[in-house]
Image (cartoon, rainbow, N blue to C red):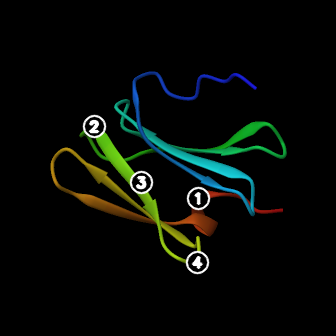
């Protein structure tokens, strides 16, 4: 599998092996979610105006915390970002 999901350098990535989703953030100010089962992008969210630097899920994989270079932290509920079937 080779897919270019970001238009700038990827700064953080998290792979959920249970749901088979890849979560990533990059210098393109995007938070993206890729579904490995369907081989498709399921979420493409712009997070503010600063470059994104890191992504960390909570223990239950229900939320992700995303930081930027300005010191802000964004919190996303995964269920609201991804369309589960």
- Which element is circle 3 on? strand
Residue at left 58%, top 70%? Answer: 61
Distance of label 3 from label 4 (alpha carbons): 15 Å
Closer to the observer: label 3 or label 2?
Answer: 3
Q: Residues within 10 Å of mark 3 (few under 14, many from 20)?
A: many
Comparing labels 1 and 2, the label whose residue is closer to the camera:
2
What label sits on residue 81 in the rendered view? 1
As drawn, the label of residue 60 is 4
Mark 4 residue crowding within 10 angstroms, few (<14) / some (14–19) / many (20+): few
| Foreground residue among 59 and 63 | 59
Tell me the element at label 4. Answer: loop
CA gap, disc 3 and disc 2: 12 Å
**Callouts 3 and 4 close, C-beta under 8 Å:** no
Distance from Cα at disc 1 to Cα at disc 3: 15 Å
The residue tagged 3 is 55
Q: CA distance from mark 2 to mark 4?
A: 26 Å
Identify the secondary structure beneath mark 2.
loop
For marks 1 and 2, the one nearer the N-term is 2
């Amino acid at each position: 599998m080779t897919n270019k999901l970001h238009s700038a350098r990827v700064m953080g990535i998290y792979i959920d092996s249970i749901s088979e989703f890849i979560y990533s953030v990059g210098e393109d100010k995007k938070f993206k979610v890729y579904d490995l089962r369907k081989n498709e992008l399921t979420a493409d969210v712009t997070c503010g105006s600063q470059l994104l630097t890191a992504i960390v899920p909570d223990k239950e994989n229900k939320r992700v915390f995303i930081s930027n270079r300005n010191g802000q932290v964004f919190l996303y509920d995964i269920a609201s970002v991804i369309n589960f079937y």
